[in-house]
Image (spheres, grey):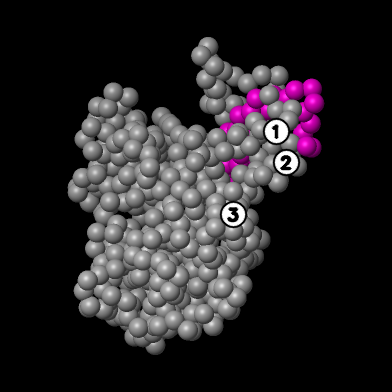
Amino acid sequence: MSTETAPPIWEIAGVSPDAIALEDHRAQVTWGELERRSNALGRGLESLGLVPGDHVALVVSNRVEFVEALLGGMRAGMVITPVKTSWTPDEIAYLLRDAGSRVVVTDVEPARAAAASVGVPVVDLEQGVGGTPFATWLAAQDPAPLPRDRHGYRLSYTSGTTGRPKGVHRLADGRRPWCEAFAASRAFAAQAGVPADGPHLNVSALFHGAPLAFSLSLLASGCTFRILPRWDADAALTALERGVRSTCMVPTMFRQLLALPEERRRAFHAPELRAVVHGGEPCPQHVKQRMIDWLGPILLEYYGMTEGGLTAATSAEWLARPGTVGTAKLGLRILILGPDGAQLPPGAQGTIHFLPASGKAFEYRKAPEKTAAAYSREGAFTVGDIGYVDADGYLFISGRTADVIVSGGVNVYPAEIEDALARLPGVRDACVVGGPDELRGETPVAFLVLDADGTLPAIESACEASLAGYQRPRRFEIRDELPRDPTGKLLRHVLRAELWAGRESNFAAPAR
């Protein structure tokens, strides 16, 4: 093993160690402090018996310690998974078992309960480590630089139509030392056109993949990484006025910003703001147009996924081609394939695939059949979205083949909700689809067939107890039967069409 130590993080980012690296509502952390604290945290994980390659679950709210723990774990060679703080203990416990987690870093009760149920030790930012306050425990660790040859990386979890989370191992991850990978991550924000000459404000939950990826990419570029404790439209405007250069949002946030009193929006003044990156869910054209009319042509739209795809469109490109999500980045090619796997010409709708120049890009952990199904014979991958490209290679999304509901930028999987409903006394049949929601874009709607002893109040109460807040149906429809084809397959599209009748499509580029 090499004895060479990794360069300090401030040197990688090309900034002074005295400059501010991280900032939240409670603390500022300089680059020099981030160097010492992330090294100490990585060595603290080693003191708990972890070795390079071990898995750490990071279930932490929006605070600077989230970033310190993420970087510290990767610098020590660990595999880190940011986990939704809104998950139930059972959901977190499933991930801990599936990933073989050795430690949970957290500040929330569901993760504590999950760790206890699985028997995984906890580094608790609020309750300490083994009876020692976290600050005292961290101060006792060695802050010396970790070895250069540590290959830690971030392992994201996503889900398919079955609803069970699966780890997405991007095959490039872990192939080179973390310090080199961190430096290379600057290309992610640069390819999307995000300026790297000023503070970046994170307004989303830190566990969200794309906002975190943009934030880390800009951190590697030397930008100050500011963290809003939680999303609040008015507070976000105030924070953006403090010299922020860029931020990343989802269209639900746009709707909430546009719902603020007109005088508040008129008073907003952020002359240094140059980029509002958005994605995570389709943005209706009238919403985006209103945002451009208000803020100017500073919106940058992206389309991508955990598996590795990326397109980006500037405001000028979108105004010239309303509804586009841009052209492929990071050396990727877009292929639109028909049902037979043949490539379709410009303007023809089919399944959107990304073809990496370097070959196979990822695999789903412990799911070889799912991995194989994601790839075409050319080696291009898809997550099941439907769209088309124009003659100049600009991509338009018109729908998706998966049953996933995208609510406020968060994926909600009907199968999980249906499974919980089907276990309830009095529920004979259940189907969950995405219905229109003025603020969140989509929201889960449950169609139920009940037995004589089934009551809606009891069902609603059970959902509150067993489902995370974002999973709970906001509306219940009681039916005598649910639409199915002669083979018994549930016809979800019939129910979805009923909910969306007469409403604007939630997709930016409706099917032509």
Start-end of magenta stretch: 429-458
Residue extending furthest toward the top: 486
Mark 2 and mark 1: Cα distance apart in space: 8 Å
Gap between marks 1 and 3 measured at Cα: 24 Å
Tell me the amino acid under the disc marked 3: Ser
Q: In this view, does 166 lie above or below 432?
A: below
Label 3 crowding class (10 Å Cα cut-off): few <14, some 14-19, many 20+? few
- Count neighbours of disc 2 (C-alpha within 10 A) and say few if under 14, some if 14 to 19, many if 20 or more: some
Is any atom of residue 245 visible in this view? no
Please give the residue where the numbered disc 3 appears in the rendered image: 117
Looking at the rendered structure, the kind of residue marked 1 is Leu
- Residue occupying the point 49% across, 53% down: 96
Q: Give the number of the disc on residue 462.
A: 2
Task: Say which of 305 and 47 sits in front.
Answer: 47
User: Decide: marks 2, 1 in contact (CB < 8 A)?
Assistant: yes
Residue 286 at x, y percent in the picture: 51, 46
Q: Which amino acid does label 2 sit on?
A: Ala
95 or 335: nearer the viewer: 95
If the image is split into quadrants, where does the C terminus sit?
top left
Question: Which element is circle 3 on?
Answer: helix
Between discs 2 and 1, the one toward the N terminus: 1
Q: Name the residue under label 1.
A: 424
* Residue 477 in view of the camera: yes
Does the magenta-highlighted stretch encompass residue 451? yes
